[in-house]
């Protein structure tokens, strides 16, 4: 399995370090492995802040509020592999939620990346309790497999 990630940073609230990029990469790879996705995949990851994600949320979902992560699946297969889609992550929201839930910034970023990657693979949690439970169980297993178990509230 190979993975190409196109990173873009459009915020200044949190430093985007090499370590953070590798954590995001590890979370995407762990999700693809858990879902037994072989071959080459590509993902775009944009780091933004609350105002940036609020604008995107308003434009694409007609919800005028910041959120933690947005996923834009493409479901495109090509000769070079598959472009899964775009992940937009509010690092400002990650920091606040990590503090709120009592775990590390890294855990929150990994959890949200796994969540978003599952969306890129076609999973959803808005269509009912069963789908939400299935997605939550997958997220928990993947993040725990990374050694970053997330505290459940």
Image: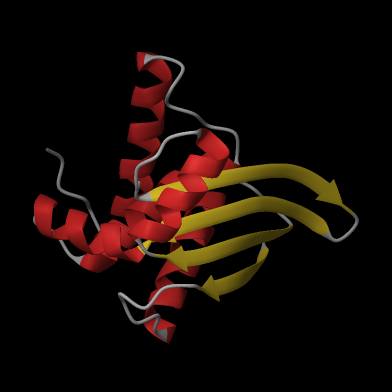
Residue positioned 12% across, 50% down in the render: 101
**What is the quadrant of the N terminus in the image?**
bottom right
Q: Position of residue 89 (x, y in %)?
A: 43, 58
Name the spot of residue 84 as percent of width and height, x first.
Answer: 67, 50
Quarter holding residue 73: top right
Q: Which of 16/140 is in front? A: 16
How many numbered dots are placed on residues in this image?
A: 0
Q: Residue at x 43, y 54 (%)?
A: 53
Q: Which residue occupies the extreme right position in the image?
A: 79
**Point 60% across, 40% down: residue:** 121
> Does residue 116 lie above or below 105 as drawn?
above
Give coordinates of residue 143: x percent, y percent: 33, 52
Q: Left of 96 or right of it: where is 145?
A: right
Query: Left or right of 122: which side holds 12?
Result: left
Q: Quadrant of the C terminus?
A: top left
Give the image location of residue 136, x and y in percent. Answer: 34, 34
């Amino acid at each position: 399995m190979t993975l190409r990630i196109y990173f873009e940073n459009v915020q200044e609230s949190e430093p985007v370090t090499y370590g953070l990029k590798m954590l995001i990469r590890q979370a995407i790879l762990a999700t693809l492995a858990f879902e037994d996705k072989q071959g080459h995949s590509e993902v775009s990851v944009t780091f933004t802040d609350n105002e940036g994600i609020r604008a995107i949320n308003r434009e694409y979902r007609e919800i005028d509020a910041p959120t933690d992560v947005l996923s834009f699946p493409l479901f495109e297969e090509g000769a070079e592999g598959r472009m899964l889609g775009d992940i937009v992550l509010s690092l400002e929201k990650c920091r606040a939620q990590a503090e709120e839930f009592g775990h590390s910034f890294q855990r929150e970023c990994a959890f949200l990346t796994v969540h978003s990657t599952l969306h890129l693979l076609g999973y959803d949690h808005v269509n009912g309790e069963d789908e939400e439970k299935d997605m939550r169980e997958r997220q928990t297993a993947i993040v725990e497999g990374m050694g970053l178990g997330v505290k459940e509230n």
